[in-house]
Structures are given as structure tokens and as C-alpha cells.
Amino acid sequence: MDTQTKNKIISIIEKAASEKVKDENTNLVEDLGMDVLDLQEAVMDLETEFNIEEIPLETAESWRTVADVIKYVEGVCNRQS
């Protein structure tokens, strides 16, 4: 995935969490303090930005780090291409 796309994903996470992401290993809950509402906000923004039809809440709740989110979005975008 290109750097611009990764940066967009990180920007969406930072907006939802109201915290800065240090790197891709940043933990969504422990480091950023994200709760379910923050996660839902990020999911809606990711769906809109990357034309993803729907990200199941169960999938989003399984994400632990920023890298997990990037990997998921990358996989979905590759399948849509």
C-alpha cells in the first residue's frame, strides 16, 4: 500500500481517537484510548474514504493496532481492484 494511503488511514484513526499515532504498532485501545464509539467513527470514515461497502463491527473490534487497520483496508481494496 502506498504511503499516501497509509497516511490517510492514520489520519482517520487520529481524528476518531483525538490522539496522534506514533507508528503502525500503536495500539488502538491502550495507546490511543479508543472506545467503541471512536471505532465506529473510524469505520464510517474508512468506508467512505475507500469505497468499502461495509466493515463488520466484529471485524473492527478485532483490530488491535494501526497496522491491523491498514492490513484490512489494503486487503479489501485489493479485492475490489
Image (cartoon, rainbow, N blue to C red):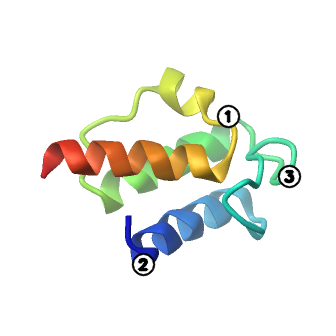
Which residue is denoted by mark 3 in the rendering?
31
User: Residue at image x 57%, y 70%?
Assistant: 11
Residue 13, compared with residue 65, is above or below; it is: below
Which residue is denoted by mark 1 in the rendering?
36
Q: Tell me whether circle 1 and circle 3 mark residues in contact (CB < 8 Å).
A: no
Q: Please count the marks in the image.
A: 3
Task: Name the front one of labels 1 and 2.
Answer: 2
User: Residue at image x 74%, y 39%?
Assistant: 35
Neighbour class for label 1 at 10 Å: few (<14), some, many (≥20)?
few
Q: Amino acid at mark 3?
A: Asp
User: Residue at image x 72%, y 65%?
Assistant: 23
Question: Between 71 and 33, which is closer to the camera in this rendering?
Answer: 71
Answer left or right for 55 relative to 34.
Answer: left
**Disc 2 element:** helix
Q: In x, y percent, where is residue 28?
A: 73, 46
Q: Earlier in the sequence, mark 2 or mark 3?
A: 2
Which residue is denoted by mark 2 in the rendering?
4
**Disc 1 element:** helix
Q: Earlier in the sequence, mark 1 or mark 3?
A: 3
Residue 54, compared with residue 75, is above or below; it is: above
Quadrant of residue 68 in the image?
top right
Quadrant of residue 36 in the image?
top right
The CA distance from mark 2 to mark 3 is 23 Å
